[in-house]
């Protein structure tokens, strides 16, 4: 339950739409044994919406990479909540919202990717500080330019009329989730009875994807597994308030998501370094030195992730999933 009372524009003035929205979205139901499925859905949506609104303010007020990260997490989590509970949500009211969330997420993601890349390469460039100073300076300047362009672009998006419309849409969503008419009866029942069934589909998709990887999975295939891991984790976290046994499962998935995310970061860093070397040949010796480091890290992560998957896929972490009831 957020303490925020207003959003602000980059000029420091309160953003009228966001201010009203945050006040409404802050209301959340307490969870107990009588919590209904509809209340659980509203809790999940409100949590994600509050995170987006809270970080919207923070990103405007500072240049802290963690604020950008948490804004992207909030957007992704809301996407996931809509996907998780789609069987009981009306799809028509959500089509435009989904498209707008993708639009917002693209701008946030561009800046977040720059922040991740900068953090990854900064320490490695520091270790090479006594060699090819001009090449290092070129890479550092390119990193800064990419960051500045992405940061300016995001602030423009957050000031846009379209963004204010998104804020209004997501807070209305959390106030009144669009439950399907035919699902009203189910939504009024105790949440813990049917909640497991909303996690079963993302788990089955994740398990099938891992089973189909083969002995030498491509980087693209492992990235897809990471995405499916994230979706399954968020689904488990969405039902965890009424199913505490889902928490260890979600934590294990978070560990898997982290190691596969680190793997993907090496892929992104390598592609950026190769492009930088082509654009500025003077930086090529340093860039390709760093490329080899990315490949070494990627090899270690490829060797390590199966053990993390073994933990996350353990049967004892999923006994609660067998409690799903068909309604």
Image: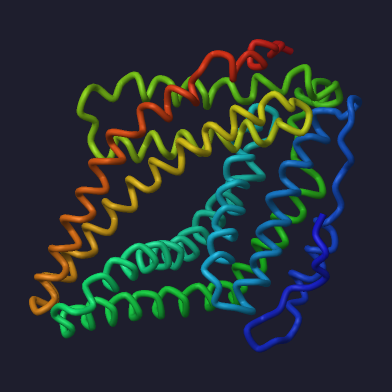
Residue at the image position 53 percent from the left and 38 percent from the top: 254
Position of 276 compared to 49: left or right? left
Instruction: Give the percent coordinates (x, y) of residue 42.
Output: 78, 41
Residue at the image position 58 percent from the left and 35 percent from the top: 251
Q: Is residue 230 placed above or below 141 in the rendered structure?
A: above
Position of 39 compared to 103: left or right? right
Residue in the foreground of this view, choosing between 243 and 152: 243
Which image quarter holds the N terminus?
bottom right
How is colour applied across the structure in the image? rainbow
Instruction: Give the percent coordinates (x, y) of residue 272.
Output: 24, 63
| Quadrant of the image occupied by residue 158 | bottom right
Residue in the foreground of this view, choosing between 31 and 38: 31
Q: How many marks?
A: 0
Residue at the image position 54 percent from the left and 57 percent from the top: 72
Q: Residue furthest bottom?
A: 11
| Quadrant of the image occupied by residue 39 | top right
Q: Is residue 66 placed above or below 283 in the rendered structure?
A: above
Instruction: Give the percent coordinates (x, y) of residue 209.
Output: 37, 25
| Quadrant of the image occupied by residue 299 | top left
Which image quarter holds the C terminus?
top right
Residue at the image position 67 percent from the left and 81 percent from the top: 9
Q: Is residue 293 placed above or below 181 in the rendered structure?
A: below
Position of 273 compared to 65: left or right? left
Instruction: Give the percent coordinates (x, y) of residue 54.
Output: 70, 64
């Amino acid at each position: 339950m957020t303490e925020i009372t207003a959003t602000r524009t980059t000029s420091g003035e309160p953003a009228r739409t966001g201010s009203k929205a945050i006040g409404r979205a802050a209301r959340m139901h307490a969870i107990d044994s009588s919590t209904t499925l509809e209340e659980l859905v509203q809790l999940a949506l409100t949590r994600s919406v509050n995170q987006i609104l809270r970080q919207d303010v923070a990103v405007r007020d500072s240049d802290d990479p963690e604020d950008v990260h948490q804004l992207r997490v909030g957007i992704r989590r809301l996407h996931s909540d809509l996907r998780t509970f789609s069987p009981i949500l009306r799809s028509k009211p959500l089509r435009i919202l989904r498209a707008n969330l993708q639009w917002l997420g693209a701008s946030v993601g561009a800046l977040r990717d720059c922040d991740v890349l900068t953090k990854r390469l900064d320490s490695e460039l520091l270790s090479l500080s006594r060699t090819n100073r001009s090449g290092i300076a070129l890479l550092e300047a390119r990193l800064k330019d990419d960051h500045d362009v992405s940061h300016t672009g995001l602030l423009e998006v957050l000031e846009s009329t379209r963004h204010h419309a998104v804020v209004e849409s997501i807070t209305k969503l959390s106030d009144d989730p669009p439950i399907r008419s035919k699902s009203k009866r189910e939504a009024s029942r105790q949440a813990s009875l049917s909640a497991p069934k909303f996690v079963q589909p993302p788990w089955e998709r994740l398990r099938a994807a891992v089973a189909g990887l083969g002995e030498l999975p491509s980087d693209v295939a492992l990235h897809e597994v990471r995405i499916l891991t994230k979706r399954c984790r968020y689904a488990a976290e969405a039902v965890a308030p009424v199913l505490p046994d889902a928490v260890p499962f979600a934590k294990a998935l978070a560990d898997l998501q982290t190691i596969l995310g680190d793997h993907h970061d090496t892929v992104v860093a390598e592609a950026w370094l190769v492009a930088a070397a082509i654009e500025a040949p003077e930086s090529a010796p340093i860039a390709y030195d760093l490329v080899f480091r990315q490949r070494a890290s990627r090899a270690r992560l490829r060797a390590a992730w199966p053990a993390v998957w073994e933990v996350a896929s353990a049967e004892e972490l999923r006994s609660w999933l067998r409690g799903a009831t068909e309604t």
